[in-house]
Amino acid sequence: MTSSTSPIRVRFAPAPTGYLHVGSARSALFNWLYARRTGGTFVLRIEDTNAELKSEEFVDAITEPLQWLGLDWDEGPFFQSERTQLYVDAIERLVGEGKAYFCNLTREQILAKCEEQGLPEGYHSFSADLGLPDGPDAVVRFRTPDSGVTVVDDSIRGRVEFDNSLLEDFVIRRSDGSPVFLVANAVDDADMGITHVVRGEDLLNTTPKVQMLWEALGYGDPPQYAHLPLLVNESRKKLSKRRDSVSLGDFRARGYLPEAMLNHLALLGWGPDDEVEVRPIAEIIERFDLADVNKGPAFFDVKKLDHINAEYVRAQSPDEFVAAATPYVTSDDAPWPAENYSADVFDLLAPEVQKRVVTHADSANFVDWVFADDISYDEKSWNKGIVKAKQVDEVLDGVIAAFGECEWEADTLDATVRQVGSDLGVKSQVPVRVAVTGKNFGIPLWDGLVALGREKTLARLADARAKL
RNA sequence: GCCCCCAUCGUCCAGCGGCCUAGGACGCCUGCCUUUCACGCAGGUAACACGGGUUCAAAUCCCGUUGGGGGUACCA
């Protein structure tokens, strides 16, 4: 790592429009990775220029997930809603210098004028030279050049050119007096000394406008831009809060580990040169570079997240696993009466649970039969493990008889079930498993049965036998 | 419509002119282990969108086509 005096400064600048989704988190992550990699500074800025966006809970909805992920910021959060005067001043300056002007046309009027004058749909500098005064219905528009090109130098995409004649004089201040984000962007990036702007590709088209403002405001060289490929859903469309369930908070609630989420997110649009995918964030920081980010959009695949999460879970020490899983098995949502739960029993079974769960929240599904008073039979399991099995009646009768008198100890129970099976010449474990747990899969039975007790075990076996 | 971006296995990533009969990972399939499932281990399946160039040599460079996506607001 380079020294902490590195001049590189990046920012994550979300609009507070609800919960933070995985796409925004990925943008935050890549900014953070670049800052940490270069010893630079990571700034958090809330882009609440629109009055409707100001809301404390929305701000928490951004900062909490970031903190959960461990994406710590060095400066901020700064709020654009508190910096409005700077933007107003900048706009005033542009108007004063003739680089922007007032316009009082509504969208309808603009379209009507186009129709009238046979011009293509759009704003054609109609009010540019009218010298209109400010007023309650007036917006401020920035005067864009009529010719030439604006070049965006992008770390990921290279040189992107925009034809100036195609950019209409865009609004930089609404009629209610509020500045639009383009101005706030330029002013803040300049004021905060941002050197690299790393954000989603959906903003690439707005970049020439910001650069024009930047230049008009006399800020000198613009920051280096890097437009990240978008994260898309299964139908290759930009992730949307409305139709895609991609809330970071939801993943957290479902028990995913922040480290796994971070690891997965880092692999979307970037990959380490040595092809080792699941690895500590410190190693990712070491290898990360903006120049290595791909251009193509990436699908957020939960299956892969599941795999990575499971790897992180399995990599935990037994104690770490128990500590992480305990909140879920002691939660009110656990499918058994709270008083039935035993920490000692869970600790004993935990290593086998650890090998099977995707997230810690899954833990309850593997020990429910031990703590619950009653079980329900999973239909598929009953069908596969009981209906289709051979001589189930004899197996259950045999096990019931043997369990009635054998020593109630794990190895003995195991040996007893084996004995019944070999006497009958069939596999005996699965029918017993379904009868006692309701499922035809899960952790080894024996320790759980010891905890469950002879009486309950026999009752469940008898219930299943009676149901045949 | 116009502008911009993109294009390697189903998915994510490697490849940055020869090492590619294209590599890794997820998923899926098979086998081993195991009287369940899982873990672990060993295999398998599967891609350079298409067409032209440039070059001794192209997945890699250029052009076009097609396809996909993003943007076109007094939202960010």
Image (cartoon, coloured by chain):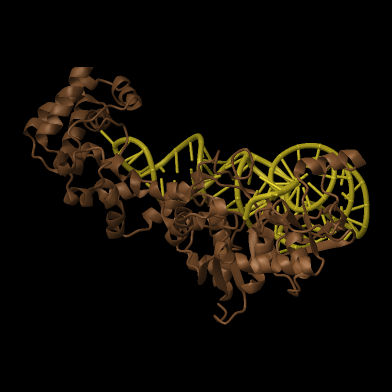
Question: Residue A144 in the image: x percent, y percent?
Answer: 83, 59
- Residue at (58% x, 63% y) in the render: A80
Question: Residue A257 in the image: x percent, y percent?
Answer: 41, 54
Residue A198, quarter of picture: bottom right
Between A121 and A429, which is closer to the camera in this rendering?
A121
Residue B43, quarter of picture: top right
Q: Which chain is yellow?
A: B
Question: Residue A29 in the image: x percent, y percent?
Answer: 54, 61
A444 vs A191, left or right, is left
Quarter placement of the C terminus of chain A: top left
Residue B47, quarter of picture: top right
Does residue A196 appear in this view? no
Question: Residue A107 in the image: x percent, y percent?
Answer: 76, 43
Quarter placement of the N terminus of chain A: bottom right
B3 vs A324, left or right, is right
- Residue at (28% x, 51% y) in the render: A327
Q: Which chain is brown?
A: A
Does residue A186 appear in this view? yes
A62 vs B73, left or right, is left
Q: How many marks?
A: 0
Between A127 and A305, which is closer to the camera in this rendering?
A127
Between A67 and B55, which is closer to the camera in this rendering?
A67
- Residue at (27% x, 26% y) in the render: A377
The correct choice, above or below, for A402 with respect to A36 in the image is above
